[in-house]
Structures are given as C-alpha cells and as structure tokens.
C-alpha cells in the first residue's frame, strides 16, 4: 500500500486513540525501507510499499511483541491464515500469571482446549467433529 493507505489502515486499527500523521508515518516508512524491511515501487505517481523477505522474517521474530500489542490495543495485526499469531497472543495473555496459578490445573485446561481445537480440523459430518 502507499503512504496514505498505510495511514488509513493505522487509523482503522488503532483509532480513535491514535491518529497517524504524515510527519510520523513517512519517516518511519523511509527508515524501514533503509533497513531493507520494506521495498518501495513507484506506481501512478505514488510509491507503493511491500514487506521484503527480510521484513517478513523480522515480523516473524517479533511475534511475541506483536501479540502483546494486539492484547493491549485490541487491534488485529497478524494475518489470519496462521495459528502462530494466535498462540503468541495467548502466551502474552497468560505469561503474567506464571507463579500465580496451579500448573497442573492449567495443564488440564490446556489439554481440554487442545482436544477441542483438534476437533476444529476434523471434516464436517464425521464422528471426530466436536461440538
């Protein structure tokens, strides 16, 4: 997307508490491009940006940080085609409880959740489908 689209997306994700400005977004985009995390391509008088392979790796390495931001802001930052961001968000949510809860009780809850989630992958109309 180009810079204006990026500002609109940031407003959609974080508004009304945060309103991006050209004075903050464009320097950040230029810095990310200088680091090789974004690549700009001229397109009809505007520059369209996309993440580079290095940018995708940097995002993957920061999945815990992104999950914490999602948890704190309520924004959905990760793509919806993977369970990994959901697991990172879950970890960010329960990590502060370490030492405050019974590990065996937590393990039992997690086991039940795993069984239920496994059932989500079962084909419809089969005996394996969980309701």
Image (cartoon, rainbow, N blue to C red):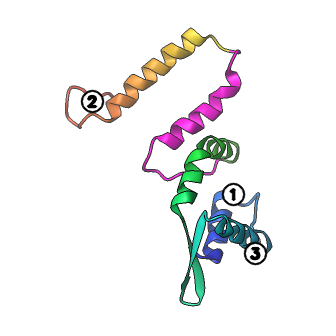
Give whichever of discs 3 and 1 has the lower sequence position.
1
Q: Residues within 10 Å of mark 1 (few under 14, many from 20)?
A: some
Q: Residues within 10 Å of mark 3 (few under 14, many from 20)?
A: few
Left or right: 108, with 7 as reference point: left
Quadrant, the N terminus:
bottom right
- Residue 47: x and y in percent read 59, 81
For label 3, the SS is helix
Left or right: 24, with 14 as reference point: right
Return the residue at label 1.
14
Return the residue at label 2.
129
Residue 76 visible somewhere in the drawing: no
- Residue 23: x and y in percent read 80, 73
Q: CA distance from mark 3 to mark 1?
A: 16 Å
Q: Point out which mark residue 51 bears.
A: none
- Residue positioned 52% across, 36% down in the render: 87
Residue 13 visible somewhere in the drawing: yes
- Residue 109: x and y in percent read 50, 18
Q: Is residue 116 above or below residue 109?
A: below
| Marks 1 and 2 close (CB-CB < 8 Å) | no
Quadrant, the C terminus:
top left
Q: Nearer the viewer, residue 115 or 39?
A: 39
- Residue positioned 57% across, 59% down in the render: 55
Return the residue at label 3.
22
| Marks 3 and 2 close (CB-CB < 8 Å) | no
Magenta residue span: 74-100
Give whichever of discs 1 and 2 has the lower sequence position.
1
- Residue 106: x and y in percent read 56, 16
- Of marks 3 and 2, the one in the foreground: 3
Q: Nearer the viewer, residue 96 or 125?
A: 96
């Amino acid at each position: 997307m180009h810079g204006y689209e990026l500002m609109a997306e940031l407003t959609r994700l974080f508004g009304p508490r945060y309103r991006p400005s050209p004075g903050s977004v464009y320097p950040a985009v230029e810095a990310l491009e200088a680091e090789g995390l974004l690549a700009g391509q001229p397109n009809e008088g505007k520059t369209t940006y996309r993440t580079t392979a290095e940018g995708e790796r940097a995002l993957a390495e920061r999945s815990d940080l992104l999950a914490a931001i999602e948890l704190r802001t309520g924004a959905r930052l990760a793509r919806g085609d993977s369970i990994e961001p959901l697991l990172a968000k879950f970890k960010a949510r329960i990590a502060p409880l370490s030492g405050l809860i019974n590990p065996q009780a937590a393990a039992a809850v997690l086991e039940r959740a795993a069984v239920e989630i496994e059932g989500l992958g079962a084909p419809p109309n089969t005996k394996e489908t969980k309701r």
